Image: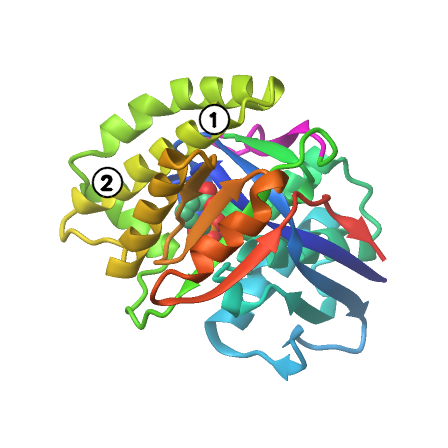
């Protein structure tokens, strides 16, 4: 009744931004990501008949409060799936997702928890089944089940039975790199959960965002299939800008950008004018991720590190899906 799994974080090139069902975590649009090699979570789950409640230890610290409840609720879903409602678990998680890199750890965290938890209870699941369960812990986590290039199909059904991720290409298809640029920013954070909810409910631009997704997905998939970096980069950057535009159309309006966020965006666009193909994307925070090709790594890293307010630049390759240890 014990298992250990490792899962990597991912970065969306076509963003997930909004839910049609908050309970089941069903998205309003399909999304597409790459899994990253550099950042991962390793989680052991041990179910034990002597326990009267779950225990969650993260980086050697016992976790309580909302983070604990979220993990325990998710374990309950796994217990229900396995038909073992009254069995509690000891969860031990280690995050190799440096906060310095500016990544959220919920994607790798819930993917590793889902993989270890389901295996510990003897469930024999396909990757698609596992992705569907993982989705209910955190939406973006359902993409981290797979390595390489991954699409989360939003699905049509209201019970969520067709909303899961699939792999489009493995991590060996194409060597694209990502630089995670962490900025020196003390902005108060609006969680992605709260930010997407406000946007769906109030943004004047939300329908425009949704209308643009099918074509972005089509172009992105064509770019990945033909390894057309300019196309992949341009579509990813434009999709990110549209997502962030929706937040400015919300009531009350908000943005995740800091002035230094814009400085990095401008620097990336200037790199292109100098002939270095590089494109940015940004999630629900001020930090920037930059897509580039291996032959430009040294130049890109140096230029990014020289920008004022840049605290850290962490480089990553495309990584694998869930593995069991
Ligand atoms: C993404 N983000 O596609 C988008 C782009 C942030 C911006 O998925 O509420 O932590 O747990 O489903 O997955 C972050 O949202 O939200 C996210 P929940 P999640 O990567």
Examine the rendered structure and indicate whether residue 185 appears above or below residue 36. below
Examine the rendered structure and indicate whether residue 211 appears above or below residue 239. above
**In this orientation, which residue lies closer to the viewer: 161 or 16?**
16
Instruction: State the residue at coordinates (44%, 54%).
Output: 303
Which residue does the numbered mark 1 point to in the structure image? 230
Q: Are marks 2 and 1 in contact (CB under 8 Å)?
A: no
**Would residue 278 be found to the left or right of residue 206 on screen?**
right
Residue 103 in picture, x, y percent from top left: 50, 59
Location of the N terminus (image quadrant): bottom right
**In this orientation, which residue lies closer to the viewer: 156 or 292?**
292
Examine the rendered structure and indicate whether residue 273 appears above or below residue 109. above
Predominant secondary structure in magenta?
loop
Disc assigned to residue 245: 2
Name the element at disc 1: helix
Give the magenta-colored segment's residue range.
Answer: 154-170
Disc assigned to residue 51: none
- Colour scheme of the rendered structure: rainbow
Mark closer to the observer (2, 1): 1
Residue 283 in picture, x, y percent from top left: 40, 50
- Disc 2 C-beta below 8 A from ligand 1: no
* Label 2: few (<14), some (14–19) or many (≥20) C-alpha neighbours in 10 Å: some
* Residue 151 part of the magenta-drawn span: no
Q: Is residue 77 visible?
A: no
Tell me the CA gap for discs 2 and 1: 22 Å
Instruction: State the residue at coordinates (30%, 46%).
Output: 266
Disc on the earlier residue, 2 or 1? 1
**In this orientation, which residue lies closer to the viewer: 125 or 298?**
298
Q: Is residue 305 visible?
A: yes
């Amino acid at each position: 009744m014990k298992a250990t799994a490792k899962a990597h974080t991912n970065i969306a090139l076509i963003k997930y931004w909004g839910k049609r069902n908050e309970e089941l975590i069903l998205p309003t649009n399909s999304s597409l990501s790459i899994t990253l090699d550099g950042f991962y979570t390793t989680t052991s789950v041990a179910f034990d008949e002597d326990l009267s409640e779950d225990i969650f230890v993260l980086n050697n610290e016992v976790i309580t409060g909302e983070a604990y409840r979220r993990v325990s609720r998710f374990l309950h879903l796994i217990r229900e799936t396995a038909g073992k409602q009254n069995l509690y678990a000891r969860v031990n998680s280690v995050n190799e997702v440096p906060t310095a890199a500016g990544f959220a750890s919920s994607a790798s965290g819930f993917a590793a928890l889902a993989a270890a938890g389901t295996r510990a209870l003897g469930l024999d699941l396909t990757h698609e089944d596992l992705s569907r369960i993982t989705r209910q812990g955190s939406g973006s986590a359902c993409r981290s089940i797979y390595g390489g290039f991954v699409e989360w199909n939003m699905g049509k059904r209201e019970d969520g039975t067709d909303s899961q991720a699939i792999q489009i290409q493995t991590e060996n298809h194409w060597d694209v790199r990502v630089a995670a640029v962490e900025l020196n920013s003390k902005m108060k954070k609006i969680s992605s959960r709260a930010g997407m909810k406000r946007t769906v409910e109030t943004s004047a631009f939300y329908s425009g965002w949704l209308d643009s997704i099918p074509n972005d997905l089509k172009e992105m998939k064509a770019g990945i299939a033909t390894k057309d970096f300019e196309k992949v980069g341009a579509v990813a950057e434009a999709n990110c800008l549209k997502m962030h535009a929706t937040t400015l159309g919300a009531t009350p309006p908000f943005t995740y950008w800091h002035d230094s966020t814009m400085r990095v965006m401008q620097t990336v666009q200037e790199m292109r004018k100098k002939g270095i193909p590089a494109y940015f994307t940004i999630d629900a925070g001020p930090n920037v991720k930059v897509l580039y090709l291996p032959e430009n790594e040294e130049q890109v890293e140096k230029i990014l590190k020289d920008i004022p307010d840049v605290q850290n630049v962490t480089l990553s390759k495309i990584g694998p899906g869930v593995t069991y240890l």
